[in-house]
Structures are given as C-alpha cells and as structure tokens.
Amino acid sequence: MQHVDELLDLLHLDAAGADHYVGQHPETLMQRTFGGQVMAQALAAVYETVDAARVAHSLKGYFLRPGSTDAPIDYFVERTRDGGTFSTRRIQAVQRGKEIFLMTASLKVPEEGLEHTERPAVEPLPPDECPPLAQVLGERSRRAAEMWEREWAAVEARFVPTQPVARGGARMQAWIRSHGDLPDDPRVHQMVLAYASDLTLLGVTTVPHPYTFGQPQLQMATVDHSMWFHRPLRADQWVLYDQSSPNAANGLGFATGRLYDEQGVLGASTSQEGLIRIVGS
C-alpha cells in the first residue's frame, strides 16, 4: 500500500444489512491480516451507527484468531447504549464464520472542561533530523524493512535516535504521519491513528533483546490493544509516537504509547500486550 488514498479505500466499508458492514483487504503478500487494519475498520463500522456529533474517546480490542488476507471481513455492530452524552458499541469481526476480533468502543459529545497534559518524557529530535524507520529496521532485519516499504508505505515513519533504556524497561520514539493529506473529518484521523498505532508498539518490547520484528526466530502477534483519544490530532501532520515497554515475561510483551502533536500536546494514548515467542535460534 503506497499511498494514503489506498488506506482511505481500506477504511470504506460496504453495508451488508442492519449494522453489518464488510471490509476488504489491500493488495498484499502477507498471509495474515494486519491488526491495525482490523481495528481501524472496526472503528469505521462503529461510526456508521452513531450520530455524527459523537466521537470516540476509547476503544479496547482483542485479537482472537489470525485473519486471512484472501477473504473479506464482516463487522457486526451491537448498539449497546445511547445516552445523553455517551454511546457504547460492541463490534465483532467475523471471517469465514469465525470471530477473529472483538472490540468495545465508547463515544461522547465533545465538551469543554478541566485540562492538563504531560509532555514527552524525552525531548525528540525534529522529524527532518531523523532517519526513515525502514532504514533503521533494515540494519537489523532486511525482511522487516522490505515489509514496511511494501505493506505500510501509506504511513511515513521516522525513527528518533538516542533513546535510553530506562530502569530495566525500554523506550522507542518515532514520528509518524499519513503519506498524503486526509479529509478534515476527525473520525478519519482517528481511524488512521488506530491503524498506525499497531505498526510499532509491540516492537518496543524487543528493544532490550537481540531480536527484532521480522526475524524468523521471533513469533510476534498482538493479543489486545487499547486506545484513548484525548484531543483532536491530525494524522496527516507529524505525530510523535512515544512508546515504552515496562515488562516482558511469559512469552508476552507489554507496551504503552503516547501520541503527541509537534507542539508536545498529548492527543491519544495506547496500550498493548502481545506474543513475543522465541521459536528458533
């Protein structure tokens, strides 16, 4: 996927019945569906069932089975609740009759109120001083670099160097943005950020170890992914993805992420747990 238009096409779902929508896959050589795609399409399905004034503020998804890239995905939305301020939805992603993903989402009408925001823990270099993430990946795994350039080129990413490993955990920062302009609709920006948030987050759990994404001896798969949207954040402008991993154990890595605009204002937060299993030497 080389351009943002292809990503936007991916987020366009076909109506197939009452609160039933169908999502397609991009042209890909991957055999397993990218988790960020499923999460973004699930959010797109949610937005088909709520008033335009309501915007997602949180979502939590569980990846139950690997999705296949050679068949469409059916999204079924359950309208759990519509209150005066909040709406709640439950979404099932089904492929060939089996549930592959389950997500709950909460939406609300935006309002004014108390505000504060924490700045990035480590001040990053600006994007134009940072190398492309694919280049950095290629230094450890040519396969990982090739996958990024082939499958996820719709998201431009730059690696922020010289980030310390802190107190036994790990940290990684990257600047990300869509490779092209997006519509002004804030819901579209949330979908693209949901898609992009799954690209690197599990990878930070391997930073202290001699393994990295794309190496055949490392099996990696997202188990669950949560996201909170705090403020409007444009996905077609540089966003700092500040990621850290406080723990890895039991074949699982845990990571959290914060997405800031270029002024250092926090727009969204993420958390993820995923499989990081050593399968060979």
Image (cartoon, rainbow, N blue to C red):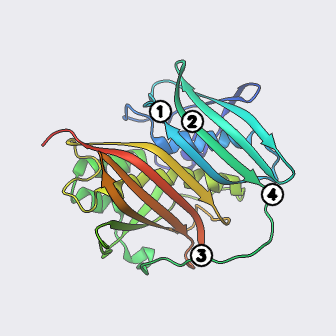
Q: Position of residue 171 (x, y in %)?
A: 36, 68
Helix, strand or loop for disc 2: strand
Determine whether label 2 and label 1 are within 8 Å by CB.
yes
Disc 2 marks a residue whose amino acid type is Leu
Classify mark 1: residues with Cα within 10 Å, few (<14), some (14-19) or many (20+).
some
Extreme residue in the right direction? 84
Q: Position of residue 72 (x, y in %)?
A: 54, 26
Looking at the rendered image, the quarter that the C terminus falls into is top left
Q: Name the residue tied to disc 3.
A: 265
- Residue 109 has which mark? 4
Q: Name the residue tied to disc 2.
A: 102
Q: Is residue 42 left or right of residue 173?
A: right
Helix, strand or loop for disc 4: loop
Disc 4 marks a residue whose amino acid type is Val
**Mark 2 or mark 1: which comes first in sequence?**
1
- Residue 64 has which mark? 1
Name the front one of labels 3 and 2. 2
In the image, is residue 257 above or below residue 23? Answer: below
Q: Is residue 62 left or right of residue 248?
A: right
Disc 1 marks a residue whose amino acid type is Leu
Extreme residue in the left direction? 281
Disc 3 marks a residue whose amino acid type is Val
Q: Position of residue 242 (x, y in %)?
A: 45, 68
**Quadrant in which residue 88 is drawn:** top right
How far apart are the alpha carbons under marks 4 and 2?
Answer: 24 Å
How far apart are the alpha carbons under marks 4 and 1?
Answer: 31 Å
